[in-house]
Amino acid sequence: MAALKKDAMIALAENAVTSAQKKGAADAEAYVYDGQSISIGLERGQITKSSLVVDRGLGIRVTINKAVGFAYTNVLEKQTAVEEAIVKALSAAKASKPDPDWHGLPEKKPFSSVENTYDPKIADLHAEDLVNITSTMLDAAVKGDKRVLAIEGGAGSGFGSTAIANSNGISVFDTGTVIECSVATVAKEGNTVTPVCFEFNAARNYAVDPEWVGREAARLAVSALKTKRIETQTTKLILTQFALQELLYFTLVNAVKADNVQRSQSPFKGKIGEKVASDNLTIHDDGLLAGGLRTSIFDAEGSPKQKTPVIEKGVLRNFLYDYYSAQKDGVESTGNALRAGYLSTPGVETTNFHVTPGIKSADELMAEVDEGLIIYYLQGAHSSNPVSGEFSVVATPAWKIKKGEIVHCSRGVMLAGNIFEVLKNVNVIASNDRQMGQLVSPWILVENVRVIGK
Amino acid sequence: MFVKDILVKSLTEAQRLGAEYAEARAESLFKTMLTLKEGRVEAAKQGMENGVALRVLVNGAWGFASVGSLDAETLTEAVSEACRMAKAASERLKNPIELAKAPVVEDRVRKKPKKNPADISMEDKIKTALAVNKNTMSYDRRVKSCTVDYLDLTGTNTFANSEGSYVEQDKLYVWSRMTASAEQKGVFTFSREEIGSTAGYELFDQETPEALGEKLAKRATEQLAAKQPKGGMFPVVLGPNVVGVFVHEAFGHLAEADLALSGGVLAGNMGKKIGSDQVTFYDDGTIPGAFGSFKYDDEGVRTQKTLLIKDGVVTGLMHNRETAEKFNAEPTGNARAEDFRVEPIIRMRCTFMAPQDQSFEELLEGVKFGYYFKSFRGGQANVDGTFQVGIQEGYEIVNGEVREPVRNASISGNTLETLLKVDAVGKDFELDSGRCGKGQTAFICDGGPHARVKEVTVGGSA
């Protein structure tokens, strides 16, 4: 299906802003999105499905007397539908309450450039290309070992374009591509079924390795077959990116968002400049990271994205801001506004949350562990206490390391503690960084984690 | 052209292009959303969405296309693309997909809410949300924050398939999630409540802002003085809210036929006894007004009350038409799609444990040391039967009595082992509304009576 043109999207956004102002909006902002994605899916060892999703729409945010109203529509071909959305946004603002902390919309600012966020090859992909990627991945997963079952997965690709205009003169456009492939596996032997293991690749350029994804997902599933119970103990853990992403998303990531700090929902409130983690931990929120999954030139309200130091050598440096929370603290936005496309108003969110890698390889990190566990998948991280950082999760499964080698896996192992204590016990950071959701991180070795065996 | 004619035209085109089956689902949705933080209305939001989901079966493989348009030409283009992609996907297919028979239906399902959210003004909705906030924040000075999210969704869903079924259904959901945090001397606690209804805005007459605010704030402040639970194996008494999430997460997902087929532990256990005599679970889409209720699913199959496990014996799974064919079973009306952007998949509706005959006191009796877990924070499960449920409100049980509160506990175990350890089940019954994520979000309900489990792993840091 034909995509909307850049000029048409910008015109749509600008016209909506003008119309809202004419109808009485003090501030007005329009967010126009147009995206298409195709995917091929596999289920239980074979390719069974395909999908095309075309999604476009316009979200309009307005204020009247400092009260914010918002409306969206996905009917763009009719001007009446867009006008109706503008009227609804205004009526919502009228019904709402003034917000004394509202200080308007972002001003126009220069943007930095970004690399590797659009690949024309991805935009031109067809279902047949994705069938090939999925087949390669599936073969790599199940050909080597009969005990492996590829239960679901597939390949997908797409593009998304965004235009934002506001009543302060912002009028911007950006477009990007993404491609991904993933497979979930289990291994079966006799009556034993392993927990679901998972691997994936995701990239902005046409650079996925479906063969590696399949092979790795199979390797993990097979290695989860041999299980032994472990004792309740305090031990060393290697946290892979899967585990870190889960653990940090609901805790540390929340703690550095300025809106949570302002609402006393962060243990980091008032702790800028203080030591909050181990010396070897440095984290940037990098909205400009080359090829990052969350990289773009501007954020969801048209502010420039940037690279913001969050933790440097264990010291808390900055919180992350959108325009609203920045105005409240009298600082500049860090370009961390994110929204669920045209369907929502912006909120504070990380871009690429990048843990600075160390120098040791993953193998060298393993070799440092005389006795400990390596954790990939976690269950229940979303039930962590988002304010205090306390977690109580189950590893599905945990792999036991002895003298640098995986010796067996163990089911039902629970990990409990406080993520902020864990960050103080980061011992070694490896060099193998990769992106998972918003997190870009290598493996991390932590000490003194309470592990409850079964 | 009328919606029906447009949909039928696209189905005819699919058949001309070689589809053995085709369905079209048109949706027209209106949403109102609010987010309040400490009484500040972050934004009052309204949305309008129109779109069509087309699904075709060609050479035994699925093709799906979603477009945000009801334009006949756009749909023709989308359906031909879906057929083309399905052909490409079918190239290496060994076991073509077939669908179980489903009755051809023609029906119009109208909602008759006492209070239609579409008729309630934005001002009134804001007033209700503000009242929840006020009752929460003013309960105790240690309450530091309160977030209220509100959503109502109304509209119509029109389904047609190439077998001649045609169903128009009203959609109506009212939902709210409220969270509060409290702080004292560096201790942070967190509390949440979630309510929902498919009946109407009268939900707030049953769940009043006063009661909601108090429940939220009381839990958050009570936890400030709570201790950490001991880690290890303990007997537990679970409240209906935790029983519900256990039934949903630990058992329900395993009883979704697609997951059962994907190596799940239930597939090989049909007709076998895997739980104690006390264990009877249902998934029910017919409870009037419940948050997971509807008349027809998104494959046009009539919903039902499905018995999953009776007296510990596995009796059924939740099916769509595809898995029902594989299991040689009847479709159970569990195929649901969040909206027109996604395909229908097997989802739960209202999943619960059937009550038995014990009083709460009888359940506590004989527990020397254990935990009473009253309310959950979140839960998750894996196809191998490993489950985890985080607890937001829990207490120690000492010598058969509920004692001091504990915070940040969670329970984990293996479903099959745990079902055998359910040794006593209460006579009370409660349902809670929630949302379930499986790639898409579904509005669901779960619950049951109080129940006791002989032993389960309790995660704690003490």
Image (cartoon, coloured by chain):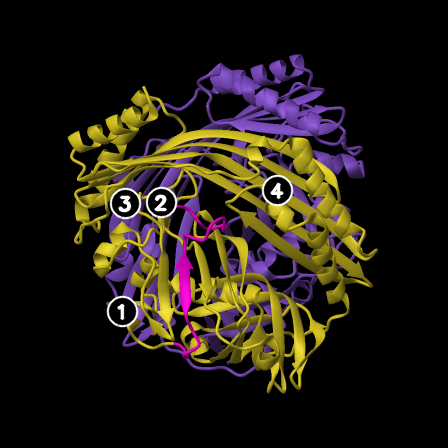
Disc 3 or disc 2, which is closer to the eye? Answer: 2
Question: How packed is label 3: few (under 14 Cα within 10 Å), some, or many (20 or more)?
Answer: many
Q: Nearer the viewer, mark 4 or mark 3?
A: 4
Q: Are marks 1 and 2 in contact (CB under 8 Å)?
A: no
**Quadrant position of residue B272:** bottom left
**The residue marked by circle 3 belongs to what chain?**
A
* Chain letter for the yellow colouring in the rendering: B
Residue corresponding to mark 2: B296
Q: Name the disc covering residue B150, or none.
A: 4
The numbered mark, 3 or 1, whose residue comes first in the sequence reads: 3
Q: Secondary structure at mark 4?
A: strand
In space, the residues marked 2 and 4 are separated at their CA atoms by 26 Å
Residue B140 falls left or right of residue B207: right
Q: Earlier in the sequence, mark 2 or mark 4?
A: 4
Identify the element where label 2 is drawn. Answer: loop
Circle 4: residue type: Tyr
Which amino acid, mark 2?
Answer: Tyr
Camera-nearest label, 1 or 4? 4
Residue B29: horizontal and vertical position, in percent? Answer: 47, 32
Measure the C-alpha gap from mark 1 to mark 4.
47 Å
- Residues drawn in magenta: B275-295
Q: Which residue is mark 1?
A: A147
The relative height of residue B248 versus residue A234 in the rendered view (above or below) is above
Q: Which residue does the numbered mark 3 point to in the structure image?
A: A49
Helix, strand or loop at mark 3: strand
Within 10 angstroms of label 1, few (less than 14), some, or many (20 or more) residues? some
Q: Residue B265, position in %: x, y?
A: 34, 69
Is residue A16 or residue B129 the one in the foreground? Answer: B129
Q: Say the numbered circle drawn on residue B435.
A: none
